[in-house]
Image (spheres, rainbow, N blue to C red):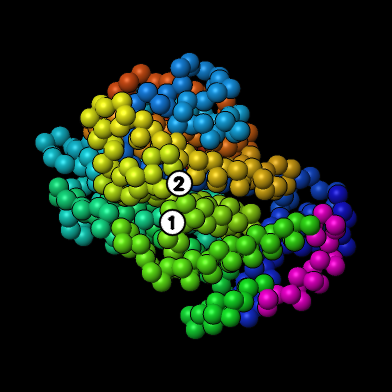
Amino acid sequence: MFLTKKHLSRRTVLRGAGVALSLPLLEAMVPAATVLAQTAAGPKPRFVGLFVPHGMAPGYWVPSTVGPLAAELPFNWKALEPFRDHTVIMSGLHSRSAEPPPGVTGADHWVAAAFLCANKPKKTAGADVYAGTTIDQLIAQKIGRETLMPSMQLAVEDPGANSSNCGEGYSCTYTNTISWSSPTSPLPMELNPQVVFERMFGDGSTAEQRSTRRKRDQSILDSLTGSLSRLRGDVSGADRARLDDYAENVREIERRLQIAMKASTVAPESMPVPIGVPQTFDEHIKLQFDLLALAFQADITRVGTLLFARDLTGRTYPECEAPTAGFHGVSHHGEDPRRIAELSKINQYHVKMVAYLVDRLATKKDGDGTLLDQSLVLYGSNMGNSNQHVHYDVPHVAIGGLNGKLKGGRHLAYPSKTVPTGNLLLSVLDKYDIHQDSIGDSTGRLEDL
């Protein structure tokens, strides 16, 4: 390890004109001859919650055996094969919280909000919404107080777009967000990567200053050239390489945001897109995931959520192997094998995007491991076979190491219609040292998780 005469704080921020640049973990932030776990390099836990509606194609996602994962994963999970040792697939769970309360109609398509709280949302189309505090926010309260942004809530579909016609007596709020800071406080999911970037790196700059910088194609790093040069002279060769890589990542995201800003002046007819939002789902979600990984690397936040799509979305995914199939439409496949196969291709494409984020975390060093070693990424849905609108046998996967608390390479199968998803959420909270008697509809814990 490089023994620096100058010890840097983990909270070191470089400041320029309207810019605040948090830094990745450097060797210079670790005092010489100090036990790693007692320093800034001590592993910090991270959490990511990812929700997708409409379940998964039957026959394409449940592993054939219980226990150790085979080298070849089911079709829908193929993209996770490089991360098999960090992956836990769960089958048989019951999303009871997505079912209507007794004597109440509707709810099938309006309760994404239940995903991370396992509470049945109150049936209302008014302002008196009520769901539950979600686990991402409970985790943020525990581990996010030291960071610039306690949590990040991201989306890739405009809540104002005509992609969902909220009805059946349920507020659109329940399908517009999966993060709730309290049972009555839904948090907005940020659609625009430009806004996310400026929240991460802005330092009180005005909207006019930010606009001028973008029009001139300036980087936020331009005003930090001197500070970065001086810092590079004070640190080891390994730290210089880490700083250079981090700065390159920032510049690359800025470049893509500039392209999005210029290209989005004409939005596609099928999906209204605000200025600054990439026109394609593929580029949009990758930008959001790149920003989240960068925020984890710089310890700007340790908690993130992302909503893949809103219920009843008619979105198509040209980059997948079923490029013309509308997501909601094909989810009602009528048990037609050809339609089920189309749905599976959309499912597989979504998992490829999850794998994109996982790869970003796996390739970023942090202390003695990687960001993936420190993280738990939870991806799932609240439906099983969406053609039948059933909420049992729902797909979930947990990916990461969470500092040794999550053992990967396994398929955990539970008896159908028996184990509520609240048990999973309660078990996840335990892994962040948040110990509650229950959450939502939980009846116990997944001891084998």
Check disc 1: other Cα within 10 Å, few if <14, some if 14-19, many if 20+: some
Question: Where residue 252 appears, x then y in whole percent?
Answer: 62, 62
**Residue segment shown in magenta:** 222-240
The circle on residue 28 is: none
What's the residue type where badge 1 is placed?
Thr
**In the rendered image, which residue does mark 2 sit on?**
319
Question: Where residue 36 appears, x then y in whole percent?
Answer: 76, 45
Q: Is residue 121 visible?
A: no
**Which of the 4 image quadrants contains residue 290?**
bottom right
Q: Residue at x 53, y 35 (%)?
A: 79
Q: Residue at x 85, y 57 (%)?
A: 237
In this view, the residue in front, 85 or 283, is: 283
Check disc 2: other Cα within 10 Å, few if <14, some if 14-19, many if 20+: few
In this view, the residue in front, 196 or 388, is: 388
Q: Is residue 430 above or below residue 134?
A: above
Indicate left or right for 131 with 426 as reference.
left
The circle on residue 280 is: 1
Q: Earlier in the sequence, mark 2 or mark 1?
A: 1
**Which of the 4 image quadrants contains residue 250?**
bottom right
Magenta span has 223? yes
Asked if the residue under mark 1 is in contact with the one under mark 2, i.e. CB atoms within 8 Å, the reply is yes
What's the residue type where badge 2 is placed?
Glu
